[in-house]
Image (spheres, rainbow, N blue to C red):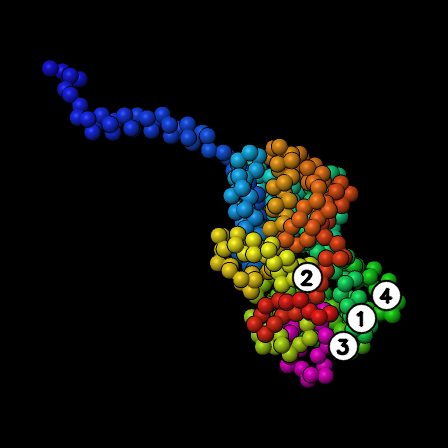
């Protein structure tokens, strides 16, 4: 009797049939799985003490958890994040943009905190026509880049909004002689120009001097004392967390009469500033500009965000969120982008770009956008969206009285 004539045990016949069936079904199942739509993050993940890129990622992932749970985009395709680290080095950022642009199904890239990196990336963005979403960086030129068409959209502060707000706040507090303490970068220069324009509209206010410091300087007290000697009643500070912490510690060591009020741009909120500054922070009068506070937002929307953030991170309370503006901006911007992808009906970047300018009203976490963007306006926020905040003793940023 040949081998083919031996009877096959029932269990083996069942297993063989199951394997044969799985061999037919698995390729079909794999083929039916929808391809993800990719969103990139080009951020400063590897920079010591920085929390800004992580905040952007948190906001994006919280929004994506909601979007994917509701069916994704384009009739069932899930959104997926791809991260790249530029470590605040422009050359790395340029390489990241080139690599992102070459990825199929990647619709857009979200940037990080550092305007100087993004400014250096602009020629590559122009060349590749990669859709770029700015949820933190504030230099005006990032959006005012002369691209036709413009592929850059911002849901964030811009310097020409920040400086008037800071100077108006000083003026309301009776502080009309202002010293500018600025980082010697394209971001600092953007703010110098914005401050000069804003001061022209406040005749009672005078900019008594500008002092520039370099990134990674280990002391800023001489710059500060130079402005104080020039007659400054308050300092407008443009700094990131590390240099700002140095200044705060040095100011706290001065006699109390020599400690001028500090009105700060929000670069300080992109890292572990409160820890770096330590107890000195409570000995200095420092306010920080913001565009949003979870403590003032709609409670139902805050709870929705927290529930989604809990699915993708260890965040459970408002106090757990580091870099709150970055998280909130990226959250809303991801939802807005998803709406544009669906409206475009494809992942083709030009179609999504055009759709971003045709969206209707969107009620987000930060605000209600009516609409978020238009062909003539690639800025989602305006002067009415600004507020000042202070650090509590526990290091949490909360809205200030002024």
Q: Quadrant of residue 164?
A: bottom right
Label 3 packing within 10 angstroms: few (<14), some (14-19), many (20+): many
Percent x, y of residue 219? 64, 73
Please state which of the two labelled residues, at mark 1 or mark 4, is closer to the viewer.
Answer: 1
Whether label 4 touches label 3, CB < 8 Å:
no
Percent x, y of residue 165? 77, 63
User: First in sequence: mark 4 or mark 3?
Assistant: 4
Residue 344 in view: yes
Provide the residue designation for mark 2: 290
Residue 217 in view: no
Q: Residue at x 59, y 60 (%)?
A: 323
Please state which of the two labelled residues, at mark 4 or mark 3, is closer to the viewer.
Answer: 4
- Residue 172 got which mark? 1
* Circle 4 SS class: loop
Label 2 packing within 10 angstroms: few (<14), some (14-19), many (20+): many
Point out the stretch of residues depicted in magenta.
246-264
Marks 4 and 3 sit apart, C-alpha to C-alpha, by 21 Å
- Residue 202 got which mark? 4
Please state which of the two labelled residues, at mark 2 or mark 3, is closer to the viewer.
Answer: 2
Please state which of the two labelled residues, at mark 2 or mark 4, is closer to the viewer.
Answer: 2
Looking at the image, residue 124 lies above or below residue 196: above
User: First in sequence: mark 1 or mark 2?
Assistant: 1
């Amino acid at each position: 009797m040949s081998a083919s004539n031996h009877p096959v045990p029932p269990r083996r016949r069942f297993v063989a049939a199951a394997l044969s069936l799985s061999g037919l079904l698995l390729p079909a199942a794999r083929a039916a799985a929808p391809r993800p739509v990719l969103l990139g993050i080009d951020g400063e993940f590897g920079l010591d003490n920085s929390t800004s890129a992580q905040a952007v990622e948190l906001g994006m992932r919280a929004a994506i958890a909601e979007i994917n749970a509701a069916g994704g985009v384009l009739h069932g395709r899930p959104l997926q994040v791809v991260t790249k680290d530029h470590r605040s080095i422009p050359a790395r950022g340029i390489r990241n943009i080139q690599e992102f642009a070459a990825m199929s199904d990647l619709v857009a890239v979200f940037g990080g905190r550092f305007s100087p990196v993004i400014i250096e990336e602009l020629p590559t963005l122009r060349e590749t026509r990669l859709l770029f979403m700015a949820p933190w960086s504030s230099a005006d030129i990032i959006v005012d880049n002369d691209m036709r068409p413009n592929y850059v959209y911002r849901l964030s502060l811009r310097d020409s909004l920040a400086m008037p707000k800071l100077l108006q706040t000083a003026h309301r507090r009776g502080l009309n002689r202002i010293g500018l303490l600025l980082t010697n970068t394209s971001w600092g220069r953007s703010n110098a120009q914005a401050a000069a324009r804003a001061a022209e509209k406040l005749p009672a206010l005078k900019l008594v001097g500008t002092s520039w410091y370099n990134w990674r300087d280990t002391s800023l007290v001489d710059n500060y004392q130079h402005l104080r000697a020039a007659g400054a009643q308050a300092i407008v500070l443009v700094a990131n967390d590390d240099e700002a912490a140095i200044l705060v510690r040095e100011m706290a060591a001065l006699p109390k009469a020599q400690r001028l009020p500090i009105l700060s741009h929000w670069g300080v909120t992109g890292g572990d500033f409160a820890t770096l500054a330590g107890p000195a922070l409570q000995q200095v009068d420092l306010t920080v500009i913001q565009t949003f506070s979870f403590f003032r937002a709609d409670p139902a929307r805050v709870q929705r965000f927290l529930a989604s953030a809990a699915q993708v991170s260890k965040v459970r309370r408002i106090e757990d969120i580091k870099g709150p503006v970055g998280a909130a901006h990226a959250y809303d911007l991801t939802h807005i982008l998803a709406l544009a992808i669906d409206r475009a009906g494809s992942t083709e970047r030009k179609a999504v770009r055009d759709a971003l300018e045709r969206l209707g009203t969107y009620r987000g976490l930060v605000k209600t956008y009516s609409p978020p963007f238009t062909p003539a306006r690639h800025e989602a926020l305006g002067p009415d969206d600004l507020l000042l905040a202070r650090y509590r003793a526990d290091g949490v940023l909360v809205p200030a009285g002024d």
